Image: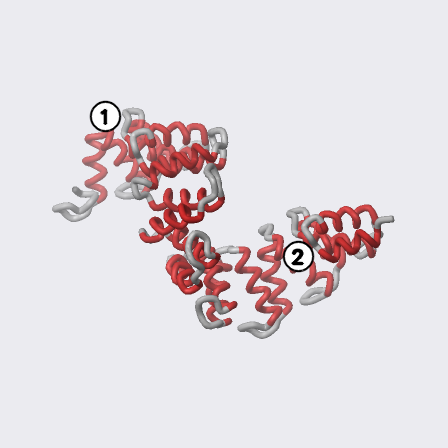
Amino acid sequence: MYAMGAGVATNYQEAVRWYRLAADQNYAEAQGNVGFMYENGLGVEKDHREASRWYRNAAEQGEVKAQAALGRMYETGLGVGKDYQEAAKWYRLAANQGHARAQNNLGVLYRNGYGVEKNQQQALIWYRKAAEQGYAIAQSNLGFSYQYGQGVEKNYEEAFKWYRLAADQGHAIGQNNLGTMYQNGFGVEKDNQEALKWYRKAADQGYAIAQANLGFMYKHGYGVKSDYQEALKWYGLAADQGNAKAQNDIGVMYISGHGVQKNYQEALKWYRKAAVQGYAVSQVNLAIMYKNGHGVAKNSLEAMTWFQKAAEQGNPNAQRNLGFMYEKGEGGQRDRAKAIGWYQKAADQGDHYSIQALKRLRP
């Protein structure tokens, strides 16, 4: 009553006192509630170690919410040493009692092979159990499994169905993913205006991927009149959260002068932000800036470094450029064998220039 303000003024200190009295008598639900208060700093100083202790007391008595909470503590390392096997153990105990969040989280562990052997079919089973209880995160995860054929045959219609259920509950990832289905015509008739609508719903919740997608729609005029300023606004919101694609796209806008004055230094800055996160497209763009001396002193060695990073991720543009630099000796001595090797990797992906280069270089 004191914790919820039911019939009395909310008073967390009083709530903790009464929970503690019951918990000290080994009442499992009260022990779990004491753990919750410590975890969230309600009526007591936040203390994850103390929270985990109380969750364990309750969990060992079979209290399902405490089992799920203790699993989460082990998964994240809050108050206990991170231990995926322990996380899986406690999630499973709660999941077997029908706890939807634990079912979903156990599915995630199976998807990633954390604490259990990686098994996409098992992940799907647990996602479905939670999704059928209406748990939005699991509905979105189940949609993802169907979209990409993880643990099940790829089925866009099923993916769309589960994304829609999650999206209708306001789940930002589900809303964004539903937008991608509409944008690409996966499992539904292609409709850029519907895609825009769902991206906006997720973007308004601060979901960076959706913000980047919304920026893309405004930049290219998909489902809405092209508006570079609006595109830059949404890209900026996503980029400030560290979204690499948005950071790269801002760099592109500075190169092209769309919505902003052309500025190579600004482009270089944004390309670098994305490149250091491992985003291959930006690594190529940054390499080109160094290669051509745009916004920075020309530096073939630095260009080669960034082409190499992207090429190793399988980017054919980078592989072709790296082959060219080895062929011409840019950034170091000529190396015919390495040039052929990188051209071959790009050619295997259909890169026309590399195919022609191989004909020229091979006897």
From this view, report whether residue 93 is shown above or below residue 1: above
Task: Give the residue drawn at x 38%, y 38%.
Answer: 127
Left or right: residue 302 versus residue 82 is right
Residue 26: numbered disc: 1
In the orientation shown, which residue stands out farthest toward the front? 189
Residue 69 on image: x %, y %? 34, 35
Task: Give the residue drawn at x 68%, y 55%.
Answer: 317
Judge whether residue 71 can be spotted in this image: yes
- Hey, what amino acid is under mark 2? Val
Say which label, 2 or 1, has the lower sequence index. 1
* Nearer to the camera, 154 or 83: 154
Residue 137 on image: x %, y %? 37, 45
Judge whether residue 77 can be spotted in this image: no
Image depth: mark 2 or mark 1 in front:
2
Task: Give the residue drawn at x 23%, y 38%.
Answer: 16
For label 1, the SS is loop
- Hey, what amino acid is under mark 1? Asn
Quadrant containing the N terminus is top left
Q: Number of marks in the image? A: 2
In the orientation shown, which residue stands out farthest toward the right? 363
* Nearer to the camera, 192 or 139: 192
For label 2, the SS is helix
Residue 22 on image: x %, y %? 20, 30
In which quarter of the view is residue 123 placed?
top left
How crowded is the residue under tag 1: few (<14 C-alpha within 10 Å), some, or many (20+)? some
**Residue at mark 2:** 284
How crowded is the residue under tag 2: few (<14 C-alpha within 10 Å), some, or many (20+)? many
From this view, report whether residue 212 is shown above or below residue 21: below
**Label 2, label 1: how far apart the Cα atoms are:** 61 Å
